[in-house]
Image (cartoon, rainbow, N blue to C red):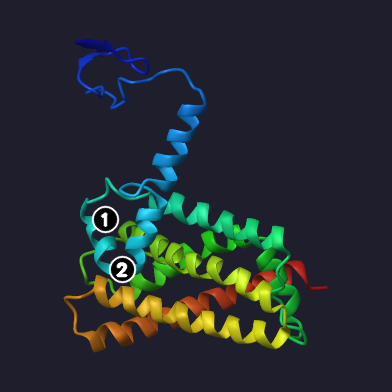
Amino acid sequence: MTTTCKNCGHIFEGRYCNHCGQSANTHRIDAKFLWEDIEHGLLHYDKGILYTAKQLFLKPGYIIKDYIKGKRVHHFKPISLSIVLATLYALVYHLTNVNLIVKDAGNSEAIFEKILEHYYWFVLITIPIFTLSTAVFFKKIGVNFWEYFIFEALKVSQRLIVHIFFLPIILLFDDSAATGFIIKLLMVIDLALIFWTNLQFFNRLPKFKVFYLTIFSYLLYLLITTVLLVVFTLAFFGE
């Protein structure tokens, strides 16, 4: 049975147009269509956010390497994933009014609060910074800059999931000392996830080499971020 594609007008046989890839089943948009869009895009076990999120905590480095090599059909797109999770983080933060500001933090409190208010943008900015830092120190691995961009986007998504999970815990305690401890714990978890993922992704390198190159790349990331924060401070808080 032939079908005329409603997207490009091409006549084809089968479930998908062999010219543009659109499905032959394009019924009217209704409640069922909306649910299928949500279910397949976000919740489907074999293709969506939950599947990709699960794999990022089972074997992160290996699945990112597979994704870069072309094994992508079951995964949510990395950049979209980081944007969705950053937006979800910002949404939870603003709806719950969770307090992440440690009192008596000096002038850094206003800067930190400004970052949290625009966390969506902050996360997007850190991806290219992490990418540049990793590309500088792991430049002889055979991975190009844009592939490292995908690598870091998925690593950022991995850490965002952890931070989203901890937001209600911080809200539950609602204590400055507890908040300070949890923020420090999150920093340790972030570093542990970076090391763990890098060890799997760069598994052909000696573990010690991956360890010290990861440290150097993270220090470069901190340096670039610090410079940008100084510029940000002078631009928005300078007199």
Q: Is residue 15 visible?
A: yes
Rendered location of residue 100, percent (x, y): 68, 75
Please say if 26 is above or below 94. above
Which quarter shows the N terminus? Answer: top left
Q: Residue at x 20, y 65 (%)?
A: 142
**Left or right: 189, with 228 as reference point:** left
Calculate the distance from the C-alpha at mark 1 to the C-alpha at mark 2.
Answer: 15 Å
Q: Residue at x 58, y 63 (%)?
A: 122
Which quarter shows the C terminus? Answer: bottom right
Bin the neighbour count of mark 2 within 10 Å (Cα to Cα): few under 14, some 14-19, many 20 and up. Answer: few
Depth order, front residue of 180/40? 40
Place residue 104 in its image quadrant: bottom right
Q: Residue at x 45, y 83 (%)?
A: 219
Q: Earlier in the sequence, mark 1 or mark 2?
A: 2
Disc 1 residue type (three-letter)? Tyr
Nearest-to-viewer mark from 1 and 2: 2
Tag 1 and tag 2, C-beta contact below 8 Å: no
Place residue 63 in its image quadrant: bottom left
Residue beneath disc 2 = 58
Disc 2 residue type (three-letter)? Leu
Rendered location of residue 77, percent (x, y): 38, 49
**Left or right: 72, with 88 as reference point:** left
Residue 140's label in the rendered image is none
Q: Residue furthest left?
A: 204
Bin the neighbour count of mark 1 within 10 Å (Cα to Cα): few under 14, some 14-19, many 20 and up. Answer: some
Rendered location of residue 212, percent (x, y): 32, 87
**Left or right: 118, with 8 as reference point:** right
Residue beneath disc 1 = 67
Callout 2: helix, strand or loop? helix
Q: Is residue 233 visible?
A: no
Please say if 89 is above or below 47. below
Callout 1: helix, strand or loop? helix
